[in-house]
Amino acid sequence: MDNPNFKSGFVAIIGRPNVGKSTFLNRVVGQKVAIMSDKAQTTRNKIQGIYTTDEAQIVFIDTPGVHKPQNRLGDFMVKSALSSLNEVDAVLFMVNADEKRGAGDNFIIDRLKEVKKPIYLVINKIDQIHPDDLLVVMDQYKNALDWKEVYPISALEGNNVDELLDNLVGNLPQGPQYYPEDQITDHPERFVVAELIREKVLQLTRQEIPHSVAVVIEKMARQDEEKIHIQATIVVDRPTQKGILIGKGGSMLKKIGTLARKDIEHLLGDKVYLELWVKVVPGWRDKASALQSYGYRKDDY
């Protein structure tokens, strides 16, 4: 790297479930690294998206939505979210423009009071409200914290996203390029592949399959010059959920596989042969051993 003035740093994105953190991350890096769904709690691990230009590199950490935990998995997610805030150069607190400030936002604001780093207020989804209503939203948060800056954005449409990135870069310290310029996430491909399959499960099953679903990649190997063979197991809580996921004559599982395969091929740049199975593990979200084997490890927070 030739630029002696190169800047780099880490930026955490925090906010209530479903405010658009993953949409923002995917827009910034220009490819899908975080799964998107209109169900709350889609993101479970801290996903790093990497934004690189000739002048700077920002490593984004997308934290799971902070909420009141209901089980061990929920507990893991909240600890994971809060632990990242003291290890970064800046924090983006993202809120939803079309929702009033609520108890969940106040819970996060209270936690942010202990953070000594610059905190940006990012008001997302401005494409969903009338411009006149924006001032009302800004007023709700104006005095809640000493914000470094306030940015109304639309992660979906891209409004003000570049301006926010420019400001973040302007305030970063000089530092090394941590990752190669063409790398957009630090997660192994197996992790992203599992997440893409889980995204399709959430999208296609809607209310029937809540968050009691995990995806385990059993095998991922090159079959020949042209094709990668992937075998994955979808883990659910109850036999009824297994039935829903398989569908009549295997129709639902086939649909999940077809959509996931398209995204995986785009990610890997290769043809993919994808095999899916469904397995029932009752109460896996409250079993420490199950959480470990499905990728939710204490080392991650």
Image (cartoon, rainbow, N blue to C red):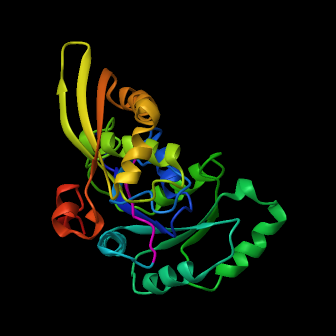
Q: Is residue 49 left or right of residue 100?
A: left
Query: Does residue 39 sit above or below 202 in this rendering?
Result: below
Which of the pair 72/33 is nearer the observer?
A: 72
Could you tell me which residue is drawn at 84 percent across and 65 percent down? 132
Q: Quadrant of residue 265?
A: top left
Confirm whether residue 57 shows in the render.
no
Residue 297, horizontal then vertical, whole percent:
20, 63
- Give yes or no for residue 59 being in the magenta stretch: yes
* Residue 115 sits above or below residue 40 on the image: below
Q: Which quadrant is home to the C terminus?
A: bottom left
Asked if residue 134 lies in the magenta stretch, the reply is no
| Residue ID at (37%, 59%) | 212
Task: Please provide the residue range marked out in magenta.
Answer: 56-67
Q: Is residue 231 above or below residue 295?
A: above
Q: Position of residue 2 (x, y in %)?
A: 28, 39
Q: Position of residue 214 (x, y in %)?
A: 32, 52
Q: Who's the residue at 36% across and 46% down the image?
A: 195
Residue 210 seen: yes
Q: Position of residue 46 (x, y in %)?
A: 33, 60
Front-most of 228 and 158?
A: 228
In-front residue for pair 131/150 = 131
Q: Nearer the viewer, residue 88 or 169?
A: 88
Q: Is residue 239 above or below residue 285?
A: above
Instruction: From the viewer's perspective, tell me whether residue 12 is left or right of residue 278.
Output: right
Numbered label tally: 0
- Quadrant, the N terminus: top left
